[in-house]
Image (cartoon, rainbow, N blue to C red):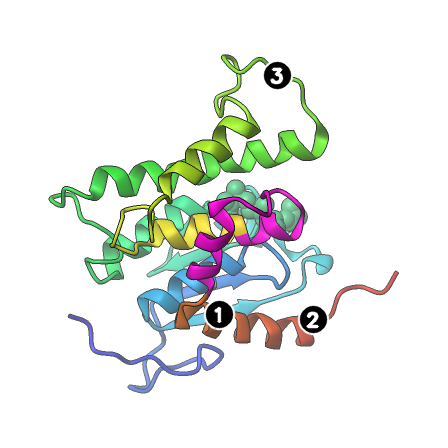
């Protein structure tokens, strides 16, 4: 078990005077929030490299050597970059998560954990875009089926809950909970869906509150561009 050396993630060194292994490249008001929440759930020390997407830094050559997609979130761990939300969750969970947050390869819950972790990017993400842009796509051709099918499957998965894996909260709940909380802001989730109560349960986690406090601080440091 790693000693808890957590300190202010804005600091360059932790309480033992060491530089954390992990750096999170992050921008406020973006999908990078989920990586903050993951790190706060796990409780591993990290350095926060926050910036404003309007600077275009993420599209520059130096950044794209770390993430060729030029997007946040990006985690660099012991010099190795990892991007894409699901991969970040799995990497951090496998290397640093307490086993209950990220079922390991010998754990019978691993299969369900992986399913929901991958479901987020593979199904929820395109399903939201289908809804927003009214894409007309054959259900058998679309890898996510349809927005309706994706949301129905998810609603059934959190019923009775409280979590995707029943009584066990995992990092998959962070990733999917974050998708739902963002989706709720943009009318992507029906008000009477069990997904609303599920997302609210997830957002009651102390780690979510810590991540939100960091998000608020960084959002004030980098306010939205004035029109
Ligand atoms: N597939 C990526 C998506 C990340 C993403 O879309 N990030 C957006 C912010 S919400 C971004 O960095 N956009 C900046 C740009 O493309 O310049 C993930 O799962 O992490």
Picture residue at 47% right of the left edge, 38% below the top: 121
* Classed neighbour count for the residue bearing mark 1: other residues with Cα under 10 Å, few (<14), some (14–19), many (≥20): many
Question: Which residue is tagged 1?
Answer: 211
Q: Residue at x 55, y 28 (%)?
A: 148
The residues bearing labels 2 and 1 have C-alpha atoms spaced at a distance of 16 Å
Is label 2 or label 1 in front? 1
Q: Which image quarter: residue 57?
A: bottom right
83, above or below 202, in the image: above
Seen from the viewer's position, the closer of residues 88 and 13 is: 88
Q: Look at the image and say whether residue 187 sits in the magenta stretch.
A: yes
Question: The C terminus is located in which quarter?
Answer: bottom right
Judged left or right of residue 69, residue 202 is left
Q: Secondary structure at mark 3?
A: loop
Callout 2 secondary element: loop
The residue positioned farthest toward the right in the image shown: 227
Q: Image quadrant for the N terminus? A: bottom left
Question: Which residues lie in the magenta part?
Answer: 181-203
Q: Position of residue 154 (x, y in %)?
A: 43, 38
- x, y (%) of residue 206? 40, 73
Q: Residue at x 62, y 66 (%)?
A: 51
**Label 3 – label 1 distance at C-alpha:** 37 Å
Residue beneath label 3, please?
A: 137
Q: Depth check: give the residue in front, 68 or 156.
A: 156
Which numbered disc flags the more N-terminal residue, 2 or 3? 3
* Left or right: 217 as drawn, with respect to 156: right
Left or right: where does residue 91 sit relative to residue 75? left
Q: Which mark is drawn over residue 222?
A: 2
Callouts 2 and 1 close, C-beta under 8 Å: no
Residue at 85% from the left image edge and 65% from the top image edge? 226
Q: Earlier in the sequence, mark 2 or mark 1?
A: 1
Q: Is residue 67 visible?
A: no
Viewer-nearest residue: 96 or 125: 125
């Amino acid at each position: 078990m790693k000693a808890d050396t957590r300190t202010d993630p804005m600091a360059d060194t932790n309480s033992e005077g060491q530089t954390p292994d992990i750096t999170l490249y992050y921008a406020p008001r973006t999908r990078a929030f989920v990586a903050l929440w993951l790190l706060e759930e796990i409780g591993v020390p990290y350095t926060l490299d926050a910036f404003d997407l309007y600077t275009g830094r993420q599209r520059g050559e130096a950044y794209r050597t770390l993430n060729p997609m030029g997007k946040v979130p990006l985690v660099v761990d012991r010099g190795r970059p990892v991007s894409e939300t699901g991969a970040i969750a799995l990497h951090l969970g496998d290397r640093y998560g307490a086993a209950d947050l990220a079922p390991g390869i010998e754990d019978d819950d691993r299969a369900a954990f992986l399913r929901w972790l991958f479901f987020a990017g593979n199904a929820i993400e395109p399903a939201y875009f289908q809804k927003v842009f009214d894409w007309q796509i054959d259900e058998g051709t679309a890898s996510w089926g349809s927005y309706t099918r994706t949301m129905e499957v998810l609603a059934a998965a959190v019923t009775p809950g409280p979590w995707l894996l029943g009584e066990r909260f995992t990092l998959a709940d962070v990733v999917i909970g974050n998708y739902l909380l963002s989706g709720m802001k943009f009318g992507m989730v029906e008000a009477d869906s069990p997904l609303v109560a599920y997302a609210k349960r997830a957002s009651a986690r102390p780690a979510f509150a810590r991540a939100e406090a960091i998000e608020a601080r960084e959002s004030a440091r980098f306010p939205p561009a004035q029109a």
